[in-house]
Image (tube, rainbow, N blue to C red):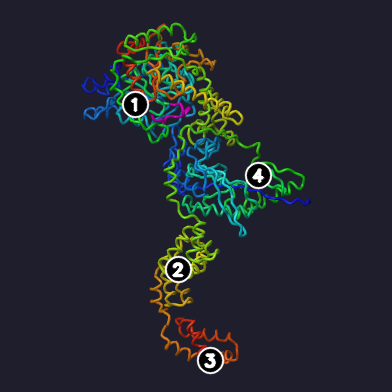
Amino acid sequence: MSNTQWETVIGLEIHTQLATKSKIFSGASTAYGAEPNTQACAVDLGLPGVLPVLNEQAVRMAVTFGLAIDAHIAPHSIFARKNYFYPDLPKGYQISQMDLPIVGNGHLDIEVDGETKRIGITRAHLEEDAGKSLHESFHGMTGIDLNRAGTPLLEIVSEPDMRSAKEAVAYMRKLHELVRYLEICDGNMQEGSFRCDANVSVRPIGQAEFGTRAEIKNINSFKFVEKAINHEIERQIEVIENGGKVVQETRLYDANKDETRSMRSKEEANDYRYFPDPDLLPVVISDEFKAQVKATLPELPHAKKQRFIEQYGQDDESASTLTSSRELADFYEAVVKNSGVEAKLASNWMTGDVLGALNKAGLEISQSPVNAARLAGLLKRIADNTISGRTAKQVFDKLWNGTATADEIIEQEGLKQITDTGAIEAIVDKVIAANPVPVEQYLSGKDKALMALVGQVMKESQGKANPGEVNKMLIEKLKN
Amino acid sequence: MYNLTIAELAKGLRAGEFSSVELTQTYLQRIHQHSELNAYVTVTDELALQQAKAADARLASGDASLLTGIPIAQKDIFCTLGVKTTCGSKMLDNFIAPYNATVVDKLNQAGAVMLGKVNMDEFAMGSSNETSYYGATKNPWNTNTVPGGSSGGSATAVAARLAVCATGTDTGGSIRQPAALCGITGLKPTYGRVSRYGMIAYASSLDQGGPMTRSAEDAAILLQAMAGFDEKDSTSVDQPVPDYLADLNKPLTGLKIGLPKEFFTADLNSDMAATLDAAINHYRQLGAEVKEISMPTLKMAIPAYYVIAPAECSANLSRFDGVRFGYRCENPADLADLYTRSRGEAFGKEVKRRILMGTYALSAGYYDAYYIKAQKVRRLISDDFKNALAEVDVIMGPVTPTPAFGIGEKLANPIEMYLSDIYTIAINLAGLPAISIPAGFINGLPVGLQIIGNYFDEARLLNVAHQYQQATDWHTHTPKGFE
């Protein structure tokens, strides 16, 4: 073992499927999960004589992304053919962009361990996705499903600016959050809407030039990215420390075995013979178009978080949580607006009960059984003391499992808090009389004993008394 | 009635002199009678008669275009719904197109009657129709000679009266050269004038469909139906289509004709030069002014073309991989074997040669030296034409260096074959329109005159060609045995 200290250098290439209704060069639907080859038209099949026609929506989405990362938007960009043979690539070439991508230099800020770091984005270019080769259940043959062929992709290429797997994951999460904010990608990683390839190399700390890199393909979850990169870093360091050399190659991550293995070396790499696609005109982006897209840009995650801190008095953590997706932030703001309650009460419920229940059920905020209006209805009744916080949890369970509103549940179940002091007093007196032991304990200085008495009163009142009120009344009575 | 032009037939159909069904039957009969010319790959007898019947009904209702009921041949490069579309290749011998090319749709809408699909050089790569998987088409003027290519089937069909008119496509001369060698009129429109959708691509930035007819007037009628913007073809140009018949009779007084001295060198044989001189003199008599011009970049056209066209074709033909349609080899051992043998067994020699040339030109390390350089040359050639056409209205010259050559004569020497397009290729690189019209005969073989115009100036080309055809009768000659 040498004592060399190693530094990792990581760059990511992320393929985001753009959320257009139809494909990038044809009118076929992009919906996921249809029967194989039912969403592939003549153009997607690469039939003789067909021609591509660019989907303007895909261009708009690429420009949206470019503007959101402060990037240069090319006034003139070119589609090129990337030539290689593969059965799920119908034309024998992929229409992509090479020399003149639509989005140039931009950046994204990430936070790791409380520090902000700026990650450069070299470029983002439009291209078409390939189909899928299915090797299972065809008895030694390969099935081809071309439903995905022609789905628009935006390939986002970062600078080699990340120095750890943790930073890479933070960047990937940030980008994932951003594309969903912009509503240009559904972010569904299981369906392959957001896919990552990582370029990883190591070098001795202090060395200026980069080490030889390996490209790891097929890492399609945040968890796997971190594992795959860390694994690759260890592998490369081991190779070098054992006197070997890292070779430039493409490696495939196997999540089941948690290892990367060589796919092809640099020598085996294809010569893609890129050249401008003569079937498509250059994409011209006018200043007017750019301005138009800019006007439709939503509030971006960072700005939204700052606003939540200022406007709602949230701490950094809950602001981060609530702005982690646009849907969640919108939900929260709808609750505040609908209920008129203190922002703090709403954020406590959102970050606590609501997200807890969603997590447990494995649901997204958009799938929440309790919508913003129904949650607001509940919070209103907490704020106006109709029910106690404890009762509210009961009501929330019923909201979650049914369709009634909070008011209906409170009414049906008779959960309204007793505000009649006389009625409470009667119960308090009854409890003091029936529980001489805790009374004695409390009076001899054991404050904890009071809790038992409060509990008894709450029980007697079937939870409808206000615990604060009960507390106060008990102390008063016992002191006298 | 098979000697009549579209314009004449349209009158006859309306006057009730004959029906489209009768006309179609006559043509179908001639096609089968002259099958030795090998003009057709597929004859669609039944479909043609159905279409003719429908056309007769349309004519009776009064809702007809000039093409309604006119029997036409489609080059087998245009996809035709439900009809075999081979592109002259074994690769597509089993390919029934599931859709219509835009041009086919447009001609159907006009009411034209499709007689069938005509022979062509394989994937439009060739100048003699000899590279077709279906064998060489013969030139009706002398069946030992070639009709030219790649639209050789179209030219033979029109010249031998096996169709009133035909569609063709032109990437480096594939409409004009066969038109010249078969004594008919062929127009290559401005790039972007006619939709390429459904026209099987050879070299996408150069390919252009156009009419092949007996007269300029017929070309105007056919182009009228073929031209126009198509949202399915991003390279088609959204510009209104003028009335091509409107200007046909405009006098040519004051027309400025440019003759590039690079076209009239020792390479052009003296008989050809004399024939063209006579034609140009005719234009002088019609009131045109003729001046010599110079276009020094013309000599670079062939090398530039043979980088750009093969480069594009190397990608365009990748889709023929034996996976989804077309030829697939028997019992492939693995994926590489499937690709190698399917393509190896189904593509002909010339197609393979061009795919290899193009693949080489695009390869890492060669791209700049070949492809980029060729594109620069292409721009220089375009500039040369632009400058010339700022000075003159049209440019005239030969279409081919010689009349039709013998079948098999140039097959062994690809360079010599490529040189037969020496006068036509530059026009494709510039994207300009050009027309080839019959201008005389040498030893009984037709000679063509080429007229090149400015972008979207097809109406002028048709006018210039029509005026000549009003004053001469070269275009009315019929090959012996086909009268």
- Badge 3 vs badge 4, beta-carbon distance below 8 Å: no
The answer to whether B5 is drawn above or below residue B192 in the figure is above
Q: Could you tell me the amino acid type at mark 2?
A: Trp
User: Which one is in front in this view, the residue at disc 1 or the one at disc 4?
Assistant: 4
Residue located beneath label 1 in the image:
B114
2 or 4: tag closer to the N-terminus: 4
* Alpha carbon distance from label 2 to label 4: 48 Å
Give the quadrant of residue B71. Answer: top left
Tell whether position A409 is magenta. no
Image coords of residue A10 (percent x, y): 63, 48
Q: Position of residue B131 (x, y in %)?
A: 49, 20
Residue labelled with disc 3: A479
**What's drawn in magenta, residue-wise?**
B194-207
For mark 1, name the chain. B
Q: Is residue B139 above or below residue B236?
A: above
* Number of marks: 4
The one nearer the camera, B183 or A3, is: A3
Identify the residue under disc 4: A214
What amino acid is at disc 3? Lys
Q: Residue at x 36, y 26 (%)?
A: B44
Q: Position of residue A180 (x, y in %)?
A: 49, 53
